[in-house]
Image (cartoon, rainbow, N blue to C red):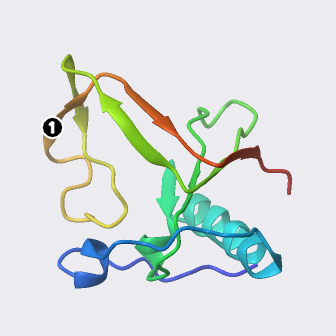
Amino acid sequence: MSIKHIITVPDETLKKISDPVEKVGENEKKLIKDLFETMYQSKGIGLAAVQVGILKRILVIDVSNKDEKKEPLCFINPKIKKLSDETAIYEEGCLDHLNLKKSLPLWWGFWLAFYCQAIKRWNF
């Protein structure tokens, strides 16, 4: 496993459309492990492959509290289907917006519905 460099705004790569994952092979499994390692090292709760410059539709998250058991989840080819009209204020914590982290409250949908080809609890 290795720590990846997280690209930040205004890098144009972040605006590109990522390719769907056809098969989760050894390269994708290594990337997923690297994404988790990078996310944990950066003290994030989520990281997408595009944020490390790889245009594949892979997202890893872990929203467990620091005093709880880790609950790493990997999403393959996620797609948002619906975002609620109801909103809530959140502090920006996106790892590719480092200058905004914890400094700007943003309005986001209170919930969202999505689908993906695979959700996997990840074991290290």
- Residue furthest to the top in view is 86
Q: How many marks?
A: 1
Left or right, 36 with reference to 124? left
Question: At label 1, which amino acid type do we have?
Answer: Pro
Is residue 8 among what the camera can see?
no
Which residue corresponds to the image point at 83% horizontal and 78% vertical from the top-left?
26
Q: Quadrant of residue 15?
A: bottom left
| Percent coordinates x, y for residue 28 in the rendering | 71, 74
- Quarter of the rendering occupied by the N terminus: bottom right
Which residue corresponds to the image point at 21% horizontal and 74% vertical from the top-left?
9
| Percent coordinates x, y for residue 103 in the rendering | 17, 48
Q: Quadrant of residue 40?
A: bottom right
Is residue 18 among what the camera can see?
yes
Q: Secondary structure at mark 1?
A: strand
Specify few, some or many for label 1: CA neighbours under 10 Å numbering under 14, 14-19, or 20 or more: some
| Percent coordinates x, y for residue 124 in the rendering | 86, 57
Which residue corresponds to the image point at 68% horizontal and 67% vertical from the top-left?
32
Q: Which residue is mark 1?
A: 105
Judging depth in this view, the residue of 52 and 83 nearest the camera is 83
Which residue corresponds to the image point at 73% horizontal and 68% vertical from the top-left?
33
Judging depth in this view, the residue of 43 and 74 nearest the camera is 74
Left or right, 3 with reference to 110? right
Judging depth in this view, the residue of 106 and 43 nearest the camera is 106
Q: Is residue 38 above or below residue 45?
A: below
Q: Is residue 4 above or below residue 43?
A: below
Left or right, 88 with reference to 71? left
